[in-house]
Image (cartoon, grey):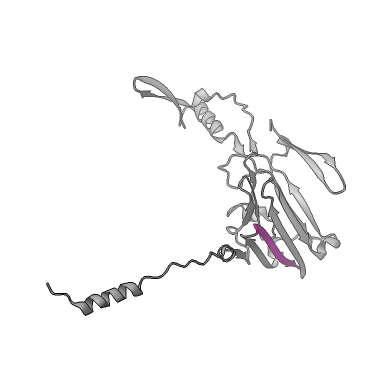
Amino acid sequence: MKLNIPAIATGLWLLLSCTSTPDQSPIDRFDLVSRHNILVDRFDSLASLTVGNGNFAFTTDLTGLQTFYKEYENGVSLGTMSNWGWHTIPNSGGYDMAETYQYYDVEGRKVPYQHQPRSPERAVAAASYFRENPHRLHLGIIRLVIHKENGEEITIRDVQIPEHRLDLWRGEVSSRFSVEGQRVEVTVFAHQEKDMVSARIVSPLMEKGRLSVEWLFPYGIPAHVHAGYDFGKGDKHTSELIDTTASSARILRQLDGD
């Protein structure tokens, strides 16, 4: 057997030249995370940004809060959701879970399984009720109310030079924009352990009485309704101020039995 030494040596040299020593330097985690920060500089209903802690989430629009929630309904809607907030619509039809059962033969036994029937009408209604209840509750909209010099409330077209950012390292959503040349800055955090959201708002419009914050509380609706809220049933829920101080307020919310 003949050995072609030059060929073997060349092949070995090529193999060694393609083998690199593993990089032992530590990962720059701040750089790795920060390179994926998000900047939104124009209205896009699919580009809402969220802060949260795994059990609570608050989704914001271009203003840093939920000012233009209607404009985002057909995109990524603006939600305030938690793992503990649930709502059940009263069972006014008196439906029983057994009305949704369909029986199947399992090794000689008749075993009931919940089913989505197409008839009769009452069984269809019963199945829909238990499929939709309980459902996760939208806890409420927190929005900016900003008025122009002429007294009219702004529309999303009046938001000028927007910079809506998500800082992944800090877990911070910030928004900077102008209204008729007046700057507004909003910074939002979610608490890491408690289901809380905190917002800092800085703007000369506050001193002029043209910027305030508004809470809107909706009625609970099933999850398959995309926006997740219903502001058309004010007679079915209440919001009562039960404790107020100069710097705080506690609101008792009641939706049916929840």
Asked if residue 60 is positioned above or below residue 19 in the image, the reply reads above
In the figure, residue 145 lies in which quadrant? bottom right
- Left or right relative to 74: residue 240: right
Asked if residue 251 is positioned above or below residue 122 in the image, the reply reads below
The residue at the far left in this view is 1
Question: Residue drawn at (52%, 26%), measured in percent from left and top?
Answer: 122
Q: Which residues are magenta?
A: 170-180
Residue 52 in percent (x, y) is at 64, 51
Question: Residue drawn at (86%, 62%), measured in percent from left and top?
Answer: 207
Q: Quadrant of the C terminus?
A: top right
Question: Residue drawn at (56%, 65%), measured in percent from left and top?
Answer: 28
Tally of marks: 0
Q: Quadrant of the N terminus?
A: bottom left
Residue 100 in percent (x, y) is at 49, 27
Question: Residue drawn at (53%, 34%), measured in percent from left and top?
Answer: 131
- Left or right relative to 33: residue 23: left
Residue 204 belongs to the span the image colors magenta: no
Residue 176 belongs to the span the image colors magenta: yes
Judged by its main secondary structure, the magenta piece is strand
Residue 136 in percent (x, y) is at 61, 40
